[in-house]
Amino acid sequence: MMIGVGPHSKPWPNDAKYDLDLLENGDKRNVLDKYRYWTLDAIKADLDDNRTSLHIAIENWQHDFNIGTIVRSANAFNVETVHIIGRRHWNRRGAMVTDRYMNIVNHQTVAEFVECMKSDNRQIIAIDIVSGAVPLSESKLPERAVLVFGGEGPGLSDEMQKLAEKVVMIEQFGSTRSVNVGVAAGIAMYAWVRQNVL
């Protein structure tokens, strides 16, 4: 089964958004049909024109492989910006190249991140299953929110939990303590989209 599309039939479109190499050789990328044969920069520019107001943040103290999955979900919901707190380098494999289409900002510390969010008038909503957290089904997620996720295992840092406007948990009913953080991020982003976009 062929993935993507083959070479474009001639005459080729002459708009600058098209990539000549892709027109010549085909486009095997995992992109929407409307973006077939477009340059990466043209796709990102179009996404930037239509971003939601949501921001996502991930604490990256342990080089968590789930970050790529979260970035991929952020792309699917076209979030405005992804913030990586801690280590600048992260495992991009799970992102499936979607990070190229995203606005990604690094912050060395939680304090630096919080100051940036304050200056952007953005409410920090921590997502973790901890004592005192409000169930997601009962939570109003503000339009100018940044949803913050911790690493798989340790979860969010104590510092982040204390500085967040509120901590929200995803209700669950099985035997495991929590869902995978990549899954949790997708659920929380969709909940925000349902409340603020759909």
Image: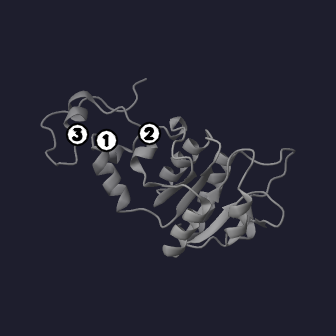
User: SS at mark 3?
Assistant: loop
User: SS at mark 2?
Assistant: loop
Above or below, comparing residue 128 to residue 137 in the picture? above
Residue beneath disc 3: 19
Q: Is residue 144 left or right of residue 182?
A: left
Q: Quadrant of the N terminus?
A: top left
Q: CA separation, marks 3 and 2?
A: 17 Å
Q: Is residue 164 left or right of residue 48?
A: right
Residue at image coords 47%, 64%? 52
Residue at image coords 62%, 42%? 66
Q: Amino acid at mark 3?
A: Asp
Q: Amino acid at mark 1?
A: Arg
Render colour scheme: one colour
Residue beneath disc 1: 36
Q: Position of residue 59 (x, y in %)?
A: 62, 52
Q: Position of residue 89 (x, y in %)?
A: 51, 42
Q: CA separation, marks 1 and 3?
A: 9 Å
Q: CA separation, marks 2 and 1?
A: 15 Å
Residue at image coords 39%, 25%? 2
**Quarter of image, res 97:** top left
Above or below, comparing residue 1 to residue 69 in the picture? above
Q: Earlier in the sequence, mark 3 or mark 2?
A: 3
